[in-house]
Image: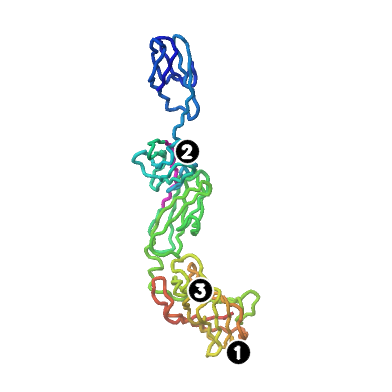
């Protein structure tokens, strides 16, 4: 309210905002016989900016004027970004002119009943800086409003936001056999940006390919790889320019995890770079391939069964080329560092002419499990002790026999048992 005095008797006095002649009339009164009026209701328009303003009192008959300075300090809210491109999505809110040290609650679309986006306490100046609020998953695309409501002062401020998330759908969402194919259709990305499709992790998942967006939409055929476990999986579409991420779920119902057991399929071997052919040396490799995945922890107890996509290895294995028996054999002795228990088995090389009749130990050898190719790969390290290897005669092949440890387990938990032979082998 306002009061005026020293105006003309019984004249109309208009109160104007910021300009004595053209300012918006914010109050009116009729002076008494002494030229005064009190308890004049003053209404400041809603669109008035925060900061310093002036109210002018102007006598309609006498043209007398008086003025007084006022300050408008309405509560305000600003956001670091008013566009949300992924859900749940965060943006930082900054407040001013709320109550001192009061709790301010942020709500979506309704100041009283809207979903809470977070709450925090203002400073002694009634301010809040860069407080992260989170717009929840499931919020529809389009325009929304964020409200900030003071718990003590009941002051409130609001600001408009736009939710603009991308979408992804799959033509096929269940796979009884692998590999499999499905068509991924993406939309609401930025025009002309390239979208990358990834499996099970939007940052580090296996890339399933890329496709350019035309007017923000596009599709491509995706190949679902063989090395997946049964259960739920996710394809992510990631915008290269916008940073938008969309996802779609699919299910594998009959992957390798349903196999009762795993069987060796092939033994391959290769000499190291610059090595002597037909003689075991550092860098030589022997690889055993299986028809389905093993449980990594059944090989080395320190390996994770949950890892079905990347190679796990140890570099401290002691590989023994045994020359004391009828045929030379390859085995791994003891438990390498990192493996409380270690299981492999024995490969009978089918010939006895790889040694001089004594054993040779290759220390610091590498043993690796590759779940994608379903292979155990042994890379020979340096010779420890006496080197009793010899170069085998040229042009002679042999039938190798792999007798695996009964403690090796398939992904389904069945023992990999039995003895497997592979003809036509020329080792090292």
Q: In the rendering, at what x and y percent does residue 7 appear? A: 44, 12
* Residue 284 or residue 311, whichever sits in front: 311
Q: Main secondary structure of the magenta part?
A: strand
Q: Earlier in the sequence, mark 1 or mark 2?
A: 2
Quarter containing the C terminus: bottom right
Image mark for residue 16: none
> How far apart are labels 3 and 2 at the CA level?
57 Å
The residue carrying mark 2 is 125
Q: Is residue 363 above or below residue 31?
A: below
Q: Which range is magenta?
A: 157-169
* Residue 73 or residue 78, whichever sits in front: 73
Q: In the rendering, at what x and y percent does residue 290 appear? A: 46, 73
Q: Nearer the viewer, mark 1 or mark 2?
A: 2
The residue carrying mark 3 is 338
The residue carrying mark 1 is 356
Q: Earlier in the sequence, mark 3 or mark 1?
A: 3
Q: Earlier in the sequence, mark 3 or mark 2?
A: 2
* Residue 388 or residue 315, whichever sits in front: 315
As helix, strand or loop, the secondary structure at mark 1 comes to: loop
As helix, strand or loop, the secondary structure at mark 3 comes to: loop
């Amino acid at each position: 309210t306002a009061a005026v005095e020293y105006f003309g008797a019984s004249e109309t006095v208009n109160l104007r905002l910021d300009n004595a002649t053209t300012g918006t009339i914010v109050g009116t009164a009729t002076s008494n016989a002494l030229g005064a009026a009190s308890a004049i209701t003053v209404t400041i328009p809603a669109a008035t900016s925060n900061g310093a303003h002036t109210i002018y009192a102007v006598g309609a008959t006498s043209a007398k004027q008086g003025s007084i300075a006022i300050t408008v300090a309405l509560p305000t809210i600003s956001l670091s970004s008013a566009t949300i491109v992924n859900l749940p999505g965060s943006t930082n809110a900054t407040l001013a002119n709320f109550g001192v040290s009061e709790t301010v609650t942020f709500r979506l679309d309704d100041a009283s009943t809207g979903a809470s986006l977070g709450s925090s306490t203002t400073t002694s100046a009634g301010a809040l800086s860069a407080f992260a609020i989170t717009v929840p998953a499931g919020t529809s695309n389009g325009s929304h409003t964020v409200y900030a409501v003071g718990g003590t002062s009941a002051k409130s401020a609001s600001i408009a936001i736009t939710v603009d998330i991308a979408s992804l759908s799959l033509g096929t969402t269940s796979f009884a056999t692998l590999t499999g194919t499905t068509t991924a259709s993406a939309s609401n990305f930025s025009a002309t940006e390239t979208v990358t499709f990834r499996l099970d992790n939007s940052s580090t998942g296996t890339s399933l390919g890329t496709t350019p967006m035309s007017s923000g939409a596009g599709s491509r055929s995706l190949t679902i790889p063989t090395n997946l476990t049964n259960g739920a999986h996710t394809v992510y579409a990631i915008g290269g320019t916008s940073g938008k991420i969309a996802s779609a779920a699919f299910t594998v119902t009959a992957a390798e995890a349903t196999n009762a057991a795993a069987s060796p399929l092939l033994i391959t071997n290769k000499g190291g770079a610059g090595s002597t052919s037909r003689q075991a040396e550092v860098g030589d490799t022997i690889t055993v391939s299986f028809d389905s995945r093993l449980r990594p922890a059944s090989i080395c107890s320190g390996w994770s069964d949950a890892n079905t996509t990347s190679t796990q290895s140890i570099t401290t294995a002691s590989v023994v080329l045994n020359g004391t028996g009828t045929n030379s054999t390859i085995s791994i002795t003891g438990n390498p560092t990192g493996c409380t228990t270690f299981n492999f088995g024995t490969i009978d090389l089918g010939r006895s002419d790889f040694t001089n009749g004594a054993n040779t130990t290759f220390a610091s050898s590498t043993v690796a499990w590759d779940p994608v190719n379903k292979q155990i790969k042994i890379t020979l390290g340096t010779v420890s002790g006496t080197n009793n290897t010899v170069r085998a005669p040229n042009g002679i092949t042999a039938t190798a026999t792999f007798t695996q440890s009964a403690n090796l387990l398939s992904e389904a938990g069945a023992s990999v048992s039995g003895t497997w032979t592979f003809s036509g082998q020329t080792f090292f």
